[in-house]
Image (cartoon, helix red, strand yellow):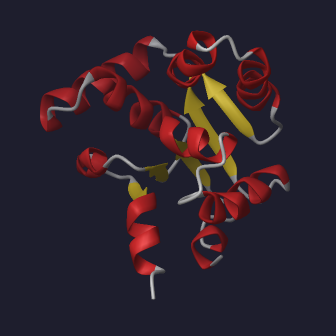
């Protein structure tokens, strides 16, 4: 897919929702996300996300005692060669506070792009239109991708 090719050689921030859609095979998004994750596996794209993502993706598997799904998320987030999960540092927390102050984002929504910026990402894959106010970051919204590919 063309949008994925445009990300080759770049560092991309990854929000929680696209990961959930991919792992849990959401029918509306899987065809758009599959090439993205294949490119990550091939090393064509470097991806970063926050440790906050671990907290967010594990809620459903823990609530439903789905150990296999929990392990799948942990494998992806902690053992993928081209996907780094970055702990929230004091610098990331300060950047997140600045984002919150200037855009009224909630703390988790500010931590994700702040983490991506700390790692040198210039693009951020999400499905949260509220993150549009993140300076210096190309926001890639899954719903916009879907809308642009509808007949």
**Which residue ends up furthest to the bottom in the rendered image?**
151
Q: Residue at x 48, y 80 (%)?
A: 149
Q: Position of residue 18 (x, y in %)?
A: 54, 46
**Which residue ends up furthest to the front in the rendered image?**
64
9 horizontally vs 91: left or right: right
Q: Residue at x 56, y 58 (%)?
A: 29
Q: Position of residue 65 (x, y in %)?
A: 67, 10
Residue 37 makes an appearance in the image: yes
Q: Position of residue 37 (x, y in %)?
A: 72, 53
48 horizontally vs 66: left or right: left
25 and 81: which is toward the camera: 25
Looking at the picture, does residue 107 appear above or below residue 99? above
Q: Position of residue 26 (x, y in %)?
A: 59, 50
Residue 87 makes an appearance in the image: no
66 and 93: which is toward the camera: 66
Give the quadrant of residue 148: bottom left
137 horizontally vs 46: left or right: left
Q: Residue at x 29, y 21 (%)?
A: 107
78 and 150: which is toward the camera: 150
Looking at the picture, does residue 6 appear above or below residue 29? below
Q: Quadrant of the N terminus?
A: bottom right
């Amino acid at each position: 897919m063309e949008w994925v090719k445009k990300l080759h050689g770049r560092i991309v921030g990854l929000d929680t929702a696209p990961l959930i859609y991919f792992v849990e095979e959401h029918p509306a998004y899987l065809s758009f996300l599959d090439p993205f994750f294949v490119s990550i596996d091939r090393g064509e794209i470097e991806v970063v996300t926050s440790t906050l993502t671990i907290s967010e993706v594990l809620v459903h598997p823990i609530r439903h005692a789905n150990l296999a799904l929990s392990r799948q998320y942990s494998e992806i987030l902690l053992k993928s060669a081209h996907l780094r999960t970055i702990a929230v540092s004091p610098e990331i927390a300060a950047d997140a506070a600045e984002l919150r102050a200037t855009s009224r984002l909630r703390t988790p929504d500010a931590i994700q792009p702040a983490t991506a910026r700390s790692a040198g990402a210039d693009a951020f894959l999400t499905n949260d239109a509220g993150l549009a106010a993140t300076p210096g970051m190309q926001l890639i919204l899954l719903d916009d991708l879907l809308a642009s590919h509808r007949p």
